[in-house]
Amino acid sequence: MRKQAREKPAGISGRAATMTVRATRALGQQPKTISTPVERMPARTASTLGVVGILGFLLGVLVGRMTTDDDIRRRWH
């Protein structure tokens, strides 16, 4: 009975170690999937990030203007 009690945690920790190794391998491969297209097309990547940044800024301005009162909107100070 004691032997079974000792083997069960070892089995659990073994499975946890296996899952950890698999997750580490998967995370190690993700940067490659991103960096390869960036290295091939740096201009397209830069322009895409620029457009997304501008759209995010404009969306933030729009939301900010919609959430402020009309009286506050007219004042600059």
Image (spheres, grey):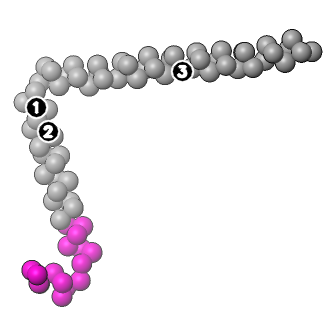
State the mark number for residue 44.
1
Asked if disc 1 and disc 2 are in contact, CB closer than 8 Å, the reply is: yes
Specify the farthest residue to the left.
Answer: 43
Q: Secondary structure at mark 1?
A: helix
CB-based contact (under 8 Å), mark 2 and mark 3: no
Magenta stretch bounds: 62-77
Q: Is residue 33 left or right of residue 55?
A: right
First in sequence: mark 1 or mark 3? 3
Foreground label between 1 and 3:
3
Magenta span main SS? helix
What is the C-alpha distance between the residues marked 1 and 2? 6 Å
- Please indicate whether residue 18 sits to the left or right of residue 1 in the image: left
Reading the image, the residue beneath label 3 is 20
Residue 67, picture quadrant: bottom left
Which residue carries the number 2 mark? 48
**Quadrant housing residue 9:** top right
Which kind of residue does numbered mark 3 sit on?
A: Thr
Tell me, yes or no, whether the highlighted magenta stretch contains residue 74.
Answer: yes
Q: Position of residue 20 (x, y in %)?
A: 54, 21
Residue type at mark 2: give it: Thr
At horizontal 11% and vertical 81% (from top left) the residue drawn is 77
Location of the N terminus by quadrant is top right
Question: How many labels sit on residues?
Answer: 3
Q: Residue at x 86, y 11 (%)?
A: 3
